[in-house]
Image: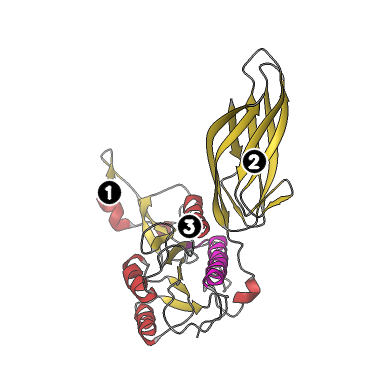
Amino acid sequence: EYSRSFSTDGIFVGDTLEFTEYLHNATAFPLFFVNMDFFVPEGLTVDGLVCKQYVKLTSVFHIPPYATLCKKHTVRADRRAHFSLESAAVIYRNNEFTFSAPISFYAYPTPADASALAEEPLFRAGEQIAGKKTVDDPFFISGIRPYQMGDPMKHINYRASVRTFSGGVRQLMCNSYDSSRNFDIMIVLDMHEGGEDTSGLSLEEKLEMGLRCACYLMCEAVRGGGNVGFAANLSPNSDKFVLIPCGSGEEHRKKILECFASLSTMGRRDYSIDALLRHCEPRIPRDADIFLITSFVDAKLAATLRALESTGRCVSTLSHAGGRCL
Protein backbone atom coordinates (compact mmCIF):
# COMPACT_ATOMS: atom_id res chain seq x y z
CA GLU A 1 0.00 0.00 0.00
CA TYR A 2 1.57 3.24 -1.20
CA SER A 3 0.72 6.91 -0.63
CA ARG A 4 2.54 10.25 -0.64
CA SER A 5 2.01 13.92 0.12
CA PHE A 6 3.55 17.39 0.00
CA SER A 7 3.81 19.44 3.19
CA THR A 8 2.16 22.44 1.49
CA ASP A 9 0.39 23.22 -1.77
CA GLY A 10 2.45 26.28 -2.71
CA ILE A 11 5.88 27.86 -2.23
CA PHE A 12 7.88 30.67 -3.82
CA VAL A 13 10.69 29.84 -6.22
CA GLY A 14 13.83 29.08 -4.22
CA ASP A 15 11.92 27.85 -1.17
CA THR A 16 11.63 24.21 -0.11
CA LEU A 17 8.89 21.86 0.99
CA GLU A 18 8.77 18.31 2.33
CA PHE A 19 7.76 15.40 0.12
CA THR A 20 6.81 12.27 2.12
CA GLU A 21 6.26 8.74 0.80
CA TYR A 22 4.49 6.03 2.81
CA LEU A 23 4.80 2.30 2.13
CA HIS A 24 2.79 -0.18 4.18
CA ASN A 25 3.45 -3.93 4.49
CA ALA A 26 0.05 -5.53 5.12
CA THR A 27 1.46 -9.06 5.35
CA ALA A 28 2.88 -11.15 8.22
CA PHE A 29 6.23 -11.44 6.42
CA PRO A 30 9.15 -9.00 6.37
CA LEU A 31 9.94 -7.49 2.98
CA PHE A 32 13.59 -6.91 2.12
CA PHE A 33 15.08 -4.75 -0.62
CA VAL A 34 11.86 -3.12 -1.74
CA ASN A 35 12.61 -0.53 -4.44
CA MET A 36 10.33 2.47 -4.57
CA ASP A 37 10.58 4.65 -7.69
CA PHE A 38 9.05 8.05 -8.30
CA PHE A 39 9.38 10.37 -11.26
CA VAL A 40 10.36 14.02 -10.96
CA PRO A 41 9.83 16.74 -13.63
CA GLU A 42 12.64 19.13 -14.48
CA GLY A 43 12.85 22.33 -12.49
CA LEU A 44 13.07 20.73 -9.05
CA THR A 45 15.96 19.85 -6.74
CA VAL A 46 15.26 16.73 -4.65
CA ASP A 47 17.58 15.96 -1.72
CA GLY A 48 20.33 18.05 -3.34
CA LEU A 49 19.96 16.44 -6.78
CA VAL A 50 19.20 19.02 -9.47
CA CYS A 51 16.67 17.63 -11.97
CA LYS A 52 17.46 19.23 -15.33
CA GLN A 53 15.18 16.78 -17.12
CA TYR A 54 12.46 14.26 -16.26
CA VAL A 55 14.23 11.74 -13.98
CA LYS A 56 13.45 8.65 -11.93
CA LEU A 57 14.59 8.49 -8.30
CA THR A 58 14.75 5.25 -6.29
CA SER A 59 14.61 4.48 -2.56
CA VAL A 60 15.31 1.04 -1.03
CA PHE A 61 13.36 -0.23 2.01
CA HIS A 62 13.31 -3.16 4.42
CA ILE A 63 9.78 -3.31 5.87
CA PRO A 64 8.85 -5.37 8.98
CA PRO A 65 5.49 -7.21 9.10
CA TYR A 66 2.42 -4.96 9.40
CA ALA A 67 4.66 -1.89 9.45
CA THR A 68 4.46 1.43 7.63
CA LEU A 69 7.66 3.17 6.64
CA CYS A 70 7.96 6.71 5.40
CA LYS A 71 10.64 8.42 3.39
CA LYS A 72 10.97 12.19 3.61
CA HIS A 73 12.54 14.21 0.79
CA THR A 74 13.43 17.89 0.67
CA VAL A 75 12.21 19.48 -2.56
CA ARG A 76 13.27 22.92 -3.78
CA ALA A 77 11.48 24.74 -6.61
CA ASP A 78 14.00 26.10 -9.13
CA ARG A 79 11.47 27.64 -11.51
CA ARG A 80 7.92 28.95 -11.58
CA ALA A 81 5.39 26.27 -12.53
CA HIS A 82 2.52 24.07 -11.44
CA PHE A 83 4.38 20.85 -10.63
CA SER A 84 2.49 17.58 -10.73
CA LEU A 85 3.58 14.02 -9.84
CA GLU A 86 1.24 11.41 -11.25
CA SER A 87 2.49 7.86 -10.65
CA ALA A 88 5.01 5.77 -8.72
CA ALA A 89 6.32 2.21 -8.94
CA VAL A 90 7.28 -0.36 -6.30
CA ILE A 91 9.57 -3.23 -7.38
CA TYR A 92 9.91 -6.34 -5.22
CA ARG A 93 11.49 -9.63 -6.35
CA ASN A 94 11.32 -8.61 -10.01
CA ASN A 95 7.63 -7.81 -9.69
CA GLU A 96 6.69 -4.23 -10.52
CA PHE A 97 3.58 -2.59 -9.10
CA THR A 98 2.49 0.78 -10.52
CA PHE A 99 0.47 3.15 -8.35
CA SER A 100 -1.55 6.17 -9.45
CA ALA A 101 -0.83 8.74 -6.74
CA PRO A 102 -1.36 12.22 -8.24
CA ILE A 103 -0.19 15.13 -6.10
CA SER A 104 0.83 18.66 -7.04
CA PHE A 105 2.03 22.00 -5.74
CA TYR A 106 2.50 25.50 -7.13
CA ALA A 107 5.85 27.32 -7.37
CA TYR A 108 5.02 31.04 -7.23
CA PRO A 109 7.30 33.66 -8.83
CA THR A 110 9.78 35.32 -6.51
CA PRO A 111 8.68 38.94 -5.89
CA ALA A 112 10.83 41.49 -7.73
CA ASP A 113 13.39 43.55 -5.87
CA ALA A 114 11.73 46.60 -4.33
CA SER A 115 14.55 48.86 -5.60
CA ALA A 116 13.36 48.25 -9.19
CA LEU A 117 10.05 49.91 -8.32
CA ALA A 118 11.39 52.66 -6.07
CA GLU A 119 10.33 55.42 -8.46
CA GLU A 120 6.67 54.41 -8.43
CA PRO A 121 4.34 55.84 -5.74
CA LEU A 122 2.97 52.39 -4.96
CA PHE A 123 0.33 53.19 -2.41
CA ARG A 124 -1.30 56.47 -1.52
CA ALA A 125 -2.74 55.30 1.82
CA GLY A 126 -0.91 55.34 5.10
CA GLU A 127 1.47 58.24 4.43
CA GLN A 128 -0.01 60.70 6.93
CA ILE A 129 -0.11 60.48 10.73
CA ALA A 130 -3.58 60.81 12.16
CA GLY A 131 -4.20 62.88 15.26
CA LYS A 132 -6.59 60.28 16.68
CA LYS A 133 -5.44 57.01 18.15
CA THR A 134 -8.45 55.17 16.73
CA VAL A 135 -9.01 54.22 13.10
CA ASP A 136 -12.11 56.25 12.37
CA ASP A 137 -13.05 57.86 9.06
CA PRO A 138 -16.60 59.32 8.86
CA PHE A 139 -16.34 59.60 5.06
CA PHE A 140 -16.23 55.81 4.59
CA ILE A 141 -19.55 54.34 5.80
CA SER A 142 -19.77 50.66 4.85
CA GLY A 143 -23.24 49.95 6.22
CA ILE A 144 -25.48 49.86 9.29
CA ARG A 145 -25.34 47.34 12.13
CA PRO A 146 -26.97 46.85 15.59
CA TYR A 147 -25.58 48.86 18.48
CA GLN A 148 -22.88 47.10 20.55
CA MET A 149 -21.71 47.91 24.05
CA GLY A 150 -18.96 50.51 23.89
CA ASP A 151 -19.96 52.10 20.56
CA PRO A 152 -19.61 55.93 20.59
CA MET A 153 -22.88 57.87 20.71
CA LYS A 154 -21.90 59.77 17.54
CA HIS A 155 -22.01 56.49 15.57
CA ILE A 156 -25.72 55.92 16.31
CA ASN A 157 -27.92 56.24 13.23
CA TYR A 158 -31.17 57.62 14.69
CA ARG A 159 -33.16 57.46 11.46
CA ALA A 160 -32.38 53.76 11.03
CA SER A 161 -33.07 53.15 14.74
CA VAL A 162 -36.59 54.59 14.42
CA ARG A 163 -37.41 52.16 11.58
CA THR A 164 -35.78 49.01 13.03
CA PHE A 165 -37.60 46.62 15.38
CA SER A 166 -36.47 43.32 16.92
CA GLY A 167 -39.06 41.23 18.81
CA GLY A 168 -41.43 44.17 18.84
CA VAL A 169 -38.82 46.41 20.46
CA ARG A 170 -37.13 49.28 18.66
CA GLN A 171 -33.49 48.37 17.89
CA LEU A 172 -30.67 50.88 18.27
CA MET A 173 -28.57 50.95 15.07
CA CYS A 174 -25.05 52.27 14.41
CA ASN A 175 -23.11 53.27 11.31
CA SER A 176 -20.34 50.84 10.37
CA TYR A 177 -17.19 52.58 9.15
CA ASP A 178 -14.36 51.43 6.94
CA SER A 179 -10.89 52.85 7.31
CA SER A 180 -9.43 54.75 4.35
CA ARG A 181 -6.65 52.17 4.57
CA ASN A 182 -8.97 49.76 2.71
CA PHE A 183 -7.73 50.49 -0.82
CA ASP A 184 -8.07 48.54 -4.06
CA ILE A 185 -5.19 47.54 -6.34
CA MET A 186 -5.74 46.11 -9.85
CA ILE A 187 -2.64 44.62 -11.51
CA VAL A 188 -2.83 44.20 -15.28
CA LEU A 189 -0.17 42.26 -17.23
CA ASP A 190 0.22 42.81 -20.98
CA MET A 191 1.72 39.90 -22.95
CA HIS A 192 0.43 40.87 -26.42
CA GLU A 193 3.28 40.97 -28.95
CA GLY A 194 1.93 43.86 -30.99
CA GLY A 195 3.15 47.46 -30.80
CA GLU A 196 6.60 49.00 -30.86
CA ASP A 197 8.32 46.88 -28.22
CA THR A 198 11.80 48.30 -27.61
CA SER A 199 12.52 46.40 -24.39
CA GLY A 200 14.81 43.88 -26.08
CA LEU A 201 13.41 41.08 -23.87
CA SER A 202 12.35 37.68 -25.13
CA LEU A 203 8.78 36.56 -24.58
CA GLU A 204 9.88 34.22 -21.76
CA GLU A 205 11.85 37.00 -20.08
CA LYS A 206 8.92 39.41 -20.34
CA LEU A 207 6.60 36.89 -18.72
CA GLU A 208 8.96 35.97 -15.88
CA MET A 209 9.96 39.56 -15.09
CA GLY A 210 6.39 40.81 -15.45
CA LEU A 211 5.10 38.16 -13.04
CA ARG A 212 7.84 38.95 -10.53
CA CYS A 213 6.82 42.60 -10.69
CA ALA A 214 3.12 41.68 -10.31
CA CYS A 215 3.94 39.40 -7.38
CA TYR A 216 5.79 42.23 -5.62
CA LEU A 217 2.85 44.60 -6.10
CA MET A 218 0.40 42.00 -4.81
CA CYS A 219 2.48 41.13 -1.72
CA GLU A 220 2.92 44.81 -0.84
CA ALA A 221 -0.80 45.48 -1.25
CA VAL A 222 -1.71 42.50 0.95
CA ARG A 223 0.82 43.62 3.56
CA GLY A 224 -0.81 47.07 3.54
CA GLY A 225 -4.30 45.65 4.02
CA GLY A 226 -5.56 46.35 0.51
CA ASN A 227 -7.81 44.42 -1.86
CA VAL A 228 -5.99 43.01 -4.89
CA GLY A 229 -7.12 41.93 -8.35
CA PHE A 230 -5.26 40.60 -11.38
CA ALA A 231 -5.89 40.55 -15.11
CA ALA A 232 -3.77 39.48 -18.10
CA ASN A 233 -4.29 38.99 -21.83
CA LEU A 234 -2.83 35.52 -21.35
CA SER A 235 -4.48 32.50 -19.77
CA PRO A 236 -3.40 29.13 -18.33
CA ASN A 237 -6.18 27.50 -20.39
CA SER A 238 -7.91 28.17 -23.71
CA ASP A 239 -9.50 31.44 -22.56
CA LYS A 240 -8.50 34.74 -24.16
CA PHE A 241 -7.61 36.34 -20.84
CA VAL A 242 -7.65 35.93 -17.08
CA LEU A 243 -9.59 38.24 -14.78
CA ILE A 244 -9.63 38.00 -10.97
CA PRO A 245 -11.59 40.93 -9.47
CA CYS A 246 -10.30 42.85 -6.45
CA GLY A 247 -10.69 40.93 -3.23
CA SER A 248 -8.99 39.97 0.01
CA GLY A 249 -8.39 36.95 2.21
CA GLU A 250 -6.03 34.02 2.10
CA GLU A 251 -8.05 32.05 -0.48
CA HIS A 252 -8.17 35.05 -2.82
CA ARG A 253 -4.41 35.58 -2.42
CA LYS A 254 -3.73 31.91 -3.19
CA LYS A 255 -5.95 32.09 -6.27
CA ILE A 256 -3.84 34.93 -7.69
CA LEU A 257 -0.54 33.25 -6.81
CA GLU A 258 -1.67 29.98 -8.39
CA CYS A 259 -2.60 31.92 -11.52
CA PHE A 260 0.91 33.44 -11.52
CA ALA A 261 2.41 29.94 -11.28
CA SER A 262 0.26 28.50 -14.09
CA LEU A 263 0.74 31.14 -16.81
CA SER A 264 2.83 30.09 -19.78
CA THR A 265 3.94 31.63 -23.07
CA MET A 266 2.22 28.68 -24.76
CA GLY A 267 -1.16 30.27 -24.00
CA ARG A 268 -3.15 32.52 -26.33
CA ARG A 269 -1.75 36.02 -26.81
CA ASP A 270 -4.08 37.49 -29.44
CA TYR A 271 -6.14 39.71 -27.13
CA SER A 272 -5.00 43.34 -27.00
CA ILE A 273 -4.39 45.08 -23.69
CA ASP A 274 -6.70 47.91 -24.78
CA ALA A 275 -9.57 45.43 -25.28
CA LEU A 276 -8.79 43.79 -21.93
CA LEU A 277 -8.91 47.09 -20.04
CA ARG A 278 -12.23 48.00 -21.66
CA HIS A 279 -13.62 44.59 -20.73
CA CYS A 280 -12.35 44.84 -17.12
CA GLU A 281 -13.46 48.45 -16.54
CA PRO A 282 -16.88 47.59 -15.03
CA ARG A 283 -15.20 45.14 -12.61
CA ILE A 284 -12.59 47.63 -11.34
CA PRO A 285 -13.70 49.78 -8.34
CA ARG A 286 -13.98 53.49 -9.10
CA ASP A 287 -11.23 54.55 -6.66
CA ALA A 288 -8.83 51.69 -7.47
CA ASP A 289 -5.14 52.05 -8.28
CA ILE A 290 -4.38 50.32 -11.59
CA PHE A 291 -0.83 49.10 -12.25
CA LEU A 292 -0.36 48.23 -15.92
CA ILE A 293 2.74 46.17 -16.75
CA THR A 294 3.42 46.60 -20.46
CA SER A 295 6.20 47.22 -22.97
CA PHE A 296 4.69 50.04 -24.99
CA VAL A 297 1.86 52.57 -24.69
CA ASP A 298 0.50 53.64 -28.05
CA ALA A 299 -2.01 56.42 -28.73
CA LYS A 300 -5.04 54.14 -28.51
CA LEU A 301 -3.96 52.64 -25.16
CA ALA A 302 -3.08 56.11 -23.83
CA ALA A 303 -6.63 57.27 -24.60
CA THR A 304 -8.06 54.27 -22.74
CA LEU A 305 -5.85 55.01 -19.73
CA ARG A 306 -6.96 58.65 -19.71
CA ALA A 307 -10.58 57.49 -19.79
CA LEU A 308 -9.93 55.28 -16.75
CA GLU A 309 -8.29 58.16 -14.89
CA SER A 310 -11.25 60.41 -15.66
CA THR A 311 -13.46 58.02 -13.63
CA GLY A 312 -11.38 58.56 -10.46
CA ARG A 313 -8.98 55.65 -10.87
CA CYS A 314 -5.23 56.17 -10.58
CA VAL A 315 -3.23 54.51 -13.39
CA SER A 316 0.52 53.74 -13.29
CA THR A 317 2.40 52.05 -16.13
CA LEU A 318 5.43 49.86 -15.52
CA SER A 319 7.71 48.00 -17.89
CA HIS A 320 8.12 44.24 -17.53
CA ALA A 321 11.51 44.89 -15.97
CA GLY A 322 9.85 46.97 -13.25
CA GLY A 323 10.77 50.54 -14.22
CA ARG A 324 8.45 53.25 -15.45
CA CYS A 325 6.99 52.65 -18.93
CA LEU A 326 6.92 55.74 -21.13
The image's mark for residue 259 is: 3
The image's mark for residue 154 is: none
**Residue 218 within the magenta-colored segment of the rendering:** yes
Give the extent of the magenta segment: 203-227
Element under label 1? loop
Residue at the disc numbered 1: 164
Tell me the mark number nearer the camera, choosing from 3 and 2.
Answer: 2
- CA gap, disc 3 to disc 2? 23 Å
Q: Residue at x 56, y 31 (%)?
A: 98
- CA gap, disc 1 to disc 2? 57 Å
- Neighbour class for label 2 at 10 Å: few (<14), some, many (≥20)? some
Residue 229 is situated, as x and y percent measured from the top left of the image, at 44, 63
Q: Residue at x 70, y 35 (%)?
A: 59
Q: Amino acid at mark 2?
A: Phe
Q: Amino acid at mark 3?
A: Cys
Residue 18 is situated, as x and y percent measured from the top left of the image, at 66, 42
Q: Amino acid at mark 1?
A: Thr
Q: Are marks 3 and 2 in contact (CB under 8 Å)?
A: no
Residue at the disc numbered 2: 19
